[in-house]
Structure formats: structure tokens, C-alpha cells
Amino acid sequence: MKDPLDKTLKKTLQDTATEMNADLIGFADPECFLGPEYTGNKPQDVMKDLQSVIVLGVGVPRGAFEPLPNGRAEYTNTLMAATATLRVIAFQLARIIEKNGYLATILPSEGSEFGYWYADRETLKANMSIKYASYHAGIGNFGLNHLLLTDDFGPRVRMTALLTDAKLGTREENPLPFLNKACTTCKKCVEICPVDAISEDGTIDRQKCADYMFNKLGGLRCGMCIKVCPL
């Protein structure tokens, strides 16, 4: 019978992710998705016996953001390279998890940015908020633009997540406030948004954001609210 908390497997996953150049790794208790404050889709609908959410992140080179709104093809390509990097790392972790007798599956990074392939067409929500899991894994907190803000990279980070029935951690409160304190007075992302999708009260018009990226920009990513973020 396996240990209820598989500390050995957790250490192996952390070491492997680091060796494969992941900048961030954390573990979230899936119970965080069951509270009334979470309004997204629940990962328990994807994996019935879910015990842990593993979040992985890599920093995105700042050089991809500096020319924006010029260089959007290069910016988008850089994001996709980060996504490809995360897929390779996550796939290796999934293999390790399953070799240890558990189940694992990988969530798409694109689902958290209204990707039409991976999100519900009506709500533009993915099967799970990777950013919300990242907050509960202690990796960062939220910006006014609903992006994850991290200490080392600010919002210039790409994330993915794995679901597994292996118990790899216990629920701990993130000491950071849900909304980054700097966002209460900054408002640069609100001012720069080309379609006014970000409101000062922190609400996002997801349809405006998606229409701009996938219709106006033809699938290229915008990135303006990330570029101007001072963090």
C-alpha cells in the first residue's frame, strides 16, 4: 500500500523539472477549486480521483515583449517555444508519475488565454485555471489583468499543469494577497489595452480580448498588458 503522501515521488518530480530547466514548480491541493470563490471549471471533472495539481512554469525572454506592438509574430513564436518546452517537461513528469503506479494527464497552457482549441467556446474558460492553481501552489498572485505575477518574472511567464491521483502535498495558504498590491495604484494594463477589455475594478471582457487576438490579429498574441507591467 502506498504512502498517502508520496514524498519520494514529489522530490523526484521537483528534481527532474529543475534539471529540465523549469523555472517554477509547485503543488496545489485540488480542494482549492471547490470553494465558492472559484468560478471556473473544476479539474475534478477531468480526473475523478484527483489528488494533486502540479504547476510548472518557465520565464519568457523580455526581448519578446520590448518591440510590441511590433514584432508580434516573434512574440507569439517565443510564447509557443515556451509552451513546447513545458510540454516536454510535463510529459516526462507524467511518465515518471505513471511508472510509480499513478495516473497523470497534462493541461494545455493555451487554455488559460482563451485558446479556442482548448477552451469552452461560450465561456472562454479552460477546464481548469492554471493561474488559480499556481496561486494556491504559492508561485505568485494575480494582477489586475488577471495574469499570474511571479517574483522572478512578473507576468512574463508561461505555465502548464498536470493532474494526478498521487497525493504530493497538503493544502497551505498562500501568504500573498490574491491581488498583487502594486496593482491597486498602477493601472498601466488598463490604460494600454487596445480594446478596453480590462476594467479598473479588475473585471475582464474575455470576449473582447479573444476577438482581438483571434480575429483582428489572426491568432497572434497581443501582449500589451504584459509589456507595460512594471513588475
Image (cartoon, rainbow, N blue to C red):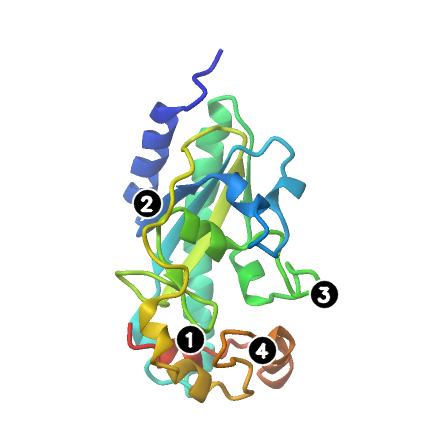
Q: Which residue is mark 4?
A: 209
C-alpha span from label 1 to label 4: 17 Å
Residue 169, quarter of the rendered image:
top left
In percent of the image, x 38 and y 27: which residue is there? 9
How far apart in space, not on screen, are marks 4 and 3 (Cα)? 14 Å
- Which dot marks residue 75? 1
Residue at image coords 41%, 24%: 5
Real-space CA distance between mark 1 and mark 3, rounded to the nearest whole angstrom: 25 Å
Q: Residues within 10 Å of mark 1 (few under 14, many from 20)?
A: many
Element under disc 3: loop
Neighbours of disc 2 within 10 Å: few (<14), some (14-19), many (20+):
some
Residue that badge 3 annotates? 121
Q: Secondary structure at mark 1?
A: helix
Q: Is residue 85 above or below residue 26?
A: below
Q: Residues within 10 Å of mark 4 (few under 14, many from 20)?
A: many
Identify the amino acid type marked 2: Met
Tag nearer the camera, 1 or 4? 4
Mark closer to the observer (1, 3) = 3
Could you give the CA–CA distance between mark 2 and mark 3, rounded to whole angstroms?
34 Å
Mark earlier in primary sequence (1, 3): 1
- Callout 2 secondary element: loop
Assess whether mark 3 and mark 4 are in contact (beta carbons under 8 angstroms).
Answer: no
Q: Which residue is more in the foreground, 63 or 166?
A: 166
Task: Report whether residue 208 is seen.
Answer: yes
The residue under label 4 is which amino acid type? Cys
Residue 229 at x, y percent in the picture: 34, 77
Instruction: Tell me if 145 is positioned left or right of 20 in this view.
Output: right
Residue 72 sits above or below residue 79 on the image:
below
